[in-house]
Image (tube, rainbow, N blue to C red):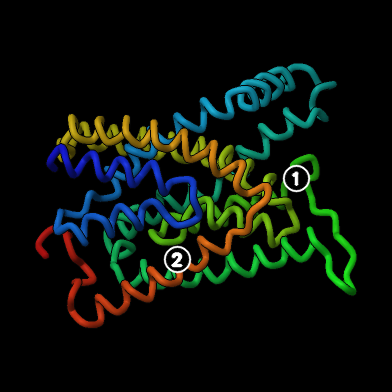
Amino acid sequence: MSWFASFVLGLVQGLTEFLPISSSAHLRLTAAFAGWDDPGAAFTAITQIGTETAVLIYFRKDIVRIVSAWFRSLTDKSLRGDHDAQMGWLVIVGSIPIGVLGVTLKDHIEGPFRDLRLIATTLIVMGIVLGIADRLAARDETGGKHRAIRERKTLQQLSVKDGLIFGFCQAMALIPGVSRSGATISGGLLMGYTREAAARYSFLLAIPAVLASGAYELKDASEGGHVDWPQTVFATIIAFAVGYAVIAWFMKFITTKSFMPFVIYRVLLGIVLFILVGTDVLSPHAGESGD
């Protein structure tokens, strides 16, 4: 991998990790359009450590409070009803699905799931799901001529059941094109949560999964020696810097704006991708080893 490619891919990772458009799909597509080799699942997982570090810093007050309350609740029964302590358990519970499925489907994640036709399909389908969820949220928030404004749930009302549903939504992002934030936010909106609550829990829920995946890939890559380390580290640093700026913008954006621009973008990108593959401009396995 060249230094220019690592810069571009790090930039793409930082720009797309927290937006509901799928960073793994965009890394895959950027490489395919540029004629580079597919950076692969290992590169994606490692550079996500950079963007997840941005989450740790941006939400550091929330994280310190939750971790502290959770640890103290292990020995102090009076704290087990505390919201922050419960959030610690809910993040753990919500992380179970992606942990189990990530290990079970590892070979598919690194192989068949990276087919451009599958990516085009998930971009369109999940874009439509996000659009429906966004529309339902807007209807509740604004009401209408014959409809009263409906109060949506906050993280104070998050239950174990909802945490698991969020977790399964997050696990869908193992397929490039789905989008971790897009799937979890859509799930949250469909369950009746506010945009801000769904996004905040989505970011917190991603921390254990992304760091565990990145650590696993780091160990695997170190033993296998199949990663260009200088370029990958450089891309990870770029992803961190850009990702932090994107989080700050996105958290402000969702409080007043609709997700429809992302919905339209996903659907159009998926259609264009189908056309390019269907007309043989792009191979569905472009950039893969041996292509």
Which structural element holds mark 2? helix
Does 254 appear above or below 172?
Answer: above
Depth check, front residue: 189 or 7: 7
Q: Where is residue 48 in the image (x, y as percent from the top left)?
A: 38, 39
Q: Is disc 1 surrounded by few (<14), some (14 to 19) or many (20+) residues within 10 Å? A: some
Dot 2 corresponds to which residue? 266
Residue at point 67% right, 55% down? 188
SS assignment at label 1: loop
- Say left or right for 175 vs 169: left
Residue visible at 47% across and 55% down in the picture: 179
Foreground: disc 2 or disc 1: 2
The image quadrant of residue 44 is: top left
Q: What is the residue that sits farthest to the bottom in this orientation? A: 279
Q: Residue 158 carries which label?
A: 1
Name which residue type carries label 1.
Leu
* Residue 122: x %, y % from top left: 43, 68
Whether 252 is drawn above or below 266: the answer is above
Amino acid at pointer 2: Arg
Query: Front-most of 153 and 77?
Result: 153
The residue located at (68%, 22%) in the rendering is 65
Q: Distance between the residues labelled 2 and 1?
A: 29 Å
Quadrant position of the C terminus in the picture: bottom left
User: In which image quadrant can residue 259 be found?
Assistant: bottom right
Q: Circle 2: is it few (<14), some (14-19), or many (20+) Cα within 10 Å? A: many
Q: Position of residue 47 (x, y in %)?
A: 33, 38
